Amino acid sequence: MPSLSRNESRFLESKELCRFATATAAGAPHVTPVLYASDGNSIVIVTDYGTKKLKNLKENPRVSLVVDEYRPNRGIVIQGECTIYEKGTEYRRLLKILFRKFKYYRNNPWGEGEAPILKITPRKIISWGLAPK
């Protein structure tokens, strides 16, 4: 499993929005902008029940996301596997990460069973415009 470099981690921590791609079991793609946080090497995203991305993830856990900017031209693509958490110790740990990063989430909290949390484990990392690893 690849790990993020210090510069890649810093870049991800400095941003809030990514474009998150999922696919059906048959491979039909779906891309949506989502807020995210990082726990050092994994990406953490919350979603709602009933979303197309959650339906896709239950059929196919392979995902991709991109975080980038145009000026300066730099960014990162992460391809990986997604695990869905709805309750438990890991759910609560990931929830704290999201609450730490986003004031809106802290002001509008939820608990176990109310919104699934997605944890993306990188399998391939591609970055550009960031200092070398």
Image (spheres, helix red, strand yellow):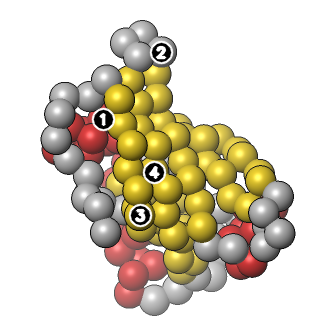
Report the residue that reaches farthest toward the top: 71
Say what secondary structure mark 1 lies in: helix
Q: Residue at x 49, y 63 (%)?
A: 80
Q: CA distance from mark 2 to mark 1?
A: 14 Å
Mark earlier in primary sequence (4, 3): 4
Q: CA distance from mark 1 to mark 4?
A: 13 Å
Residue bearing the label numbered 4: 78
Residue bearing the label numbered 1: 11
Q: Residue at x 20, y 47 (%)?
A: 5
Residue bearing the label numbered 2: 70
Q: How many marks?
A: 4
Residue bearing the label numbered 3: 123
Mark earlier in primary sequence (3, 2): 2
- Mark 1 in CB contact with mark 4 (< 8 angstroms): no
Observer-side mark, 1 or 3, equals: 3
Say what secondary structure mark 3 lies in: strand
Q: In the depicted view, which residue is nearer to us: 115 or 23? A: 23
Mark earlier in primary sequence (2, 1): 1
Q: In the depicted view, which residue is nearer to us: 11 or 104? A: 11
Q: Judge from the rendering whether residue 76 lies leftward or rightward of residue 31; answer left or right.
A: left
